[in-house]
Amino acid sequence: MAEHDGLLDRARRLGHEVFAPLAEAAEPARVNRPLIRALGEHGLLERVFEGSAVALCLLREGLAHGCTEAETALALQGLGGHPILRFAQPEMREAWIPRLAAGDAVAAFALSEPDAGSDAASLSLHAERDGDGFRLTGTKIWISNAPEADVYSVFARTTAGAGARGVTAFAVPRESDGLSGESLELLAPHPIGRVDFDGVSVAPEQVLGDVDGGFAVAMETLDLFRPSVGAFAVGMAQAALDAAVDHAARREAFGRPLSDFQAVGHQLADVATRVQAARLLVRDAAVMYDSGVRPVRQASAMAKLFATEAAQHAVDVAIQ
């Protein structure tokens, strides 16, 4: 437990002191490479690639308290890189994971499509056999870190009409011939774009996992990252609560601090209770994952739902 508290406190401190200034100096909606390199230099990305859901939740909660841009950059790096870590052949893993963990390269998780959203069973990006490898043709859209990522974990249709059983995952470097993309103008502080595949050639060693086994790659990755979405919300909720408590202690009305008024105290106590309950739901889902329980989708969904609603409530009360 002490190790958990130490990791949470360290992520929170680095978020405020180191990463926030890097985020403020960055160009909006572009990959912030100095920030990602700093995440690597301080060892946080290496912790992500250890594959522990508890550690990931602690990191996301702590960073969200001090710098949401750093939190998002860390999560996206892990999401894009995890399929390579877990399912790539040794040569591909050795080529990319050290660079991703150091923050020297940027990864992206390329699942969503214009007509399929994030439904992996309905993907239409076509992977046609080409000798021992494949050629990819089609489009991915709403991809975080696109089009600037250095490597994409891409999910494509290898067997027509097979639903989830006909999808394969590939590691595709940005410099691949026939790969292009563009940024999308959205209300998001991090880059989101589309990626177009015009007969992009991928070799057998770029397959992640098994041919037609890409659905399992996607689900295993999402199972790890789902609980930590709630942790992100908990970190923001705690930041809002801390700001409200500080303000209530300093601001006076009718000759005494706001915190002395029972109505204010009741609101803050209610928020604190919701935040702690959300934190425990998130930790429970993460501990289940690390203990080998599969699937953890119900526990993760409950944690995400409760934590995000608790965060919304915390922000509303803090503003009031």
Image (cartoon, rainbow, N blue to C red):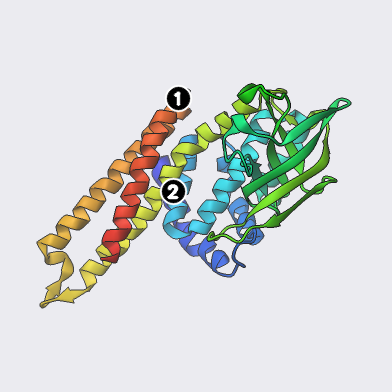
Q: In this view, does 196 lie to the left or right of 295?
A: right
Q: Residue 268 location, x and y as percent? A: 21, 57
Q: Which amino acid does label 1 sit on?
A: Ser
Q: Residue 264 location, x and y as percent? A: 16, 62
Q: Give me the residue at 42% from left, 27% from top.
A: 288
Q: Is mark 1 on a helix, strand or loop?
A: loop
Q: Is residue 26 left or right of residue 230?
A: right
Residue 232 numbered tag: 2
Q: Which amino acid does label 2 sit on?
A: Phe
> Could you tell me if residue 7 is visible in this image?
no
Residue 154 picture quarter: top right
Residue 143 numbered tag: none
Q: Residue 38 location, x and y as percent? A: 61, 57
Report which residue position mark 1 lands on: 291
Q: Is residue 88 left or right of residue 41?
A: right
- Of mark 1 and mark 2, the one earlier in the sequence is 2
